[in-house]
Image (cartoon, rainbow, N blue to C red):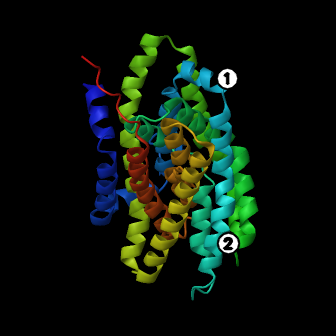
């Protein structure tokens, strides 16, 4: 029953995300309540909902790792190494171009607020949800899982490096804020919210007997998918609630345009690299998805943690999250391998 429900939800994940956005727009109150820290009754423990849900999603991603297939990938790591290199290099090409264009706008800070949000997005590891799109398009699942896992485990090192490299593009206090955000990803946030949950899931996939692992996956996967939608709703409630309280049409338009440009350029460069390398269709699909799909949930949680007084910066994160899923659908359709010819008589 659980497996059928999970399969049903995965095939409708895009629509479910849009529904989460609509619910945040129409009923933001519960989401705004969940965004606040809460004291667990009868204890001194303070719980932050969004980081907790993000940890659950990453634990589930680690738990789904096909260990044997990953072993074969490590023996032939070309696609993994190229994918990681592109995932780290593309932001260094795309973000300066967007920064140049934003400086031509009448915004007093040269678009540094929007640019800060976009830098945090592209500095995040590959989204765990990319494995769902890879499966949907019959892509190279071991390569995609390896890219998600490697980029996540390396994120306490790579994310601060990217944030530091791109911080000089910002003006005003945003550069100092981004530097502080980089230190946060090196410390508590990156370790406890991103790396440890993923590593715990991977350890479970390695250590548990097949039957127990299967039972754990059946229990955790529906919770993780629900948690992913809930964290989307929580983040959208913060951004859309702020937008409704103080409507700023020009800010929304700029967020839409900037996020769309970064998203499309990232996918396009990944697609071009796959063509140059003449990769097989499945591997090309996975490589392209890894270049364009960043963990927007993690970036939203990080912005909420480091910039709690600027909820409007979540707008480009929400737009990017929706656009990357739309682009992913086009990618997996384009790269889906042709069905084998029918057997002869």
Q: Residue at x 64, y 56 (%)?
A: 90
Quadrant location of the N terminus in the rendered image: top left
Q: Which mark is residue 152?
A: none
Q: Residue at x 27, y 65 (%)?
A: 26
| Crowd band around label 2 with a 10 angstrom C-alpha radius: few (<14), some (14–19), many (20+) | some
Query: Is residue 151 in view?
Result: yes
Q: Which residue is drawn at 57% across and 53% down?
A: 272
The picture places residue 31, in percent across and down from the top left corner, at 37, 57
**Vertical placement of 46 versus 210: above or below?**
below
Q: Pointer 1: what residue? A: 75
Q: Earlier in the sequence, mark 2 or mark 1?
A: 1
Q: Nearer the viewer, residue 119 or 328?
A: 328
**Vertical placement of 93 versus 70: above or below?**
below
The picture places residue 315, in percent across and down from the top left corner, at 46, 67
| Crowd band around label 1 with a 10 angstrom C-alpha radius: few (<14), some (14–19), many (20+) | few
Quadrant location of the C terminus in the rendered image: top left
Q: Pointer 2: what residue? A: 174
Secondary structure of residue under mark 1: helix
Query: Is residue 155 in view?
Result: no
């Amino acid at each position: 029953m659980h497996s059928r429900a999970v399969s049903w939800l995965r095939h409708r994940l895009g629509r479910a995300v849009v529904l989460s956005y609509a619910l945040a727009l129409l009923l933001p109150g519960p989401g705004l309540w969940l965004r606040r820290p809460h004291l667990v009754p009868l204890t001194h423990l303070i719980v932050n909902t969004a980081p907790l849900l993000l940890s659950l999603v990453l634990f589930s991603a680690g738990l789904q790792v096909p260990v044997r297939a990953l072993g074969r990938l490590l023996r032939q790591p070309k696609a993994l190494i190229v994918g990681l290199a592109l995932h780290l290099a593309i932001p260094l090409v795309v973000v300066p171009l967007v920064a140049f264009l934003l400086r031509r706008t009448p915004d007093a800070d040269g678009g540094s607020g929007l640019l800060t949000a976009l830098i945090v997005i592209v500095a995040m590891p590959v989204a765990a949800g990319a494995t769902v799109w890879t499966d949907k398009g019959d892509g190279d699942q071991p390569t995609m899982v390896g890219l998600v896992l490697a980029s996540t485990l390396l994120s306490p090192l790579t994310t601060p490096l990217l944030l530091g490299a791109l911080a000089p593009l910002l003006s005003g206090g945003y550069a100092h804020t981004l530097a502080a955000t980089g230190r946060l990803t090196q410390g508590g946030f990156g370790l406890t919210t991103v790396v440890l949950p993923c590593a715990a899931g991977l350890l479970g996939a390695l250590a548990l007997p097949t039957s127990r692992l299967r039972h754990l996956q059946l229990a955790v996967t529906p919770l993780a998918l629900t948690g992913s939608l809930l964290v989307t709703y929580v983040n959208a409630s913060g951004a859309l609630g702020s937008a409704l309280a103080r409507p700023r049409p020009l800010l929304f338009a700029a967020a839409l345009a900037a996020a769309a440009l970064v998203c499309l350029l990232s996918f396009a460069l990944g697609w071009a690299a796959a063509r140059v390398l003449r990769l097989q269709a499945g591997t090309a699909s996975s490589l392209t998805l890894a270049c364009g799909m960043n963990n927007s949930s993690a970036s939203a949680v990080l912005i909420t943690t480091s910039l709690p007084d600027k909820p409007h910066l979540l707008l480009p994160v929400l737009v990017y999250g929706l656009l990357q899923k739309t682009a992913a659908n086009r990618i997996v359709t384009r790269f889906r391998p042709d069905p084998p010819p029918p057997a002869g008589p």
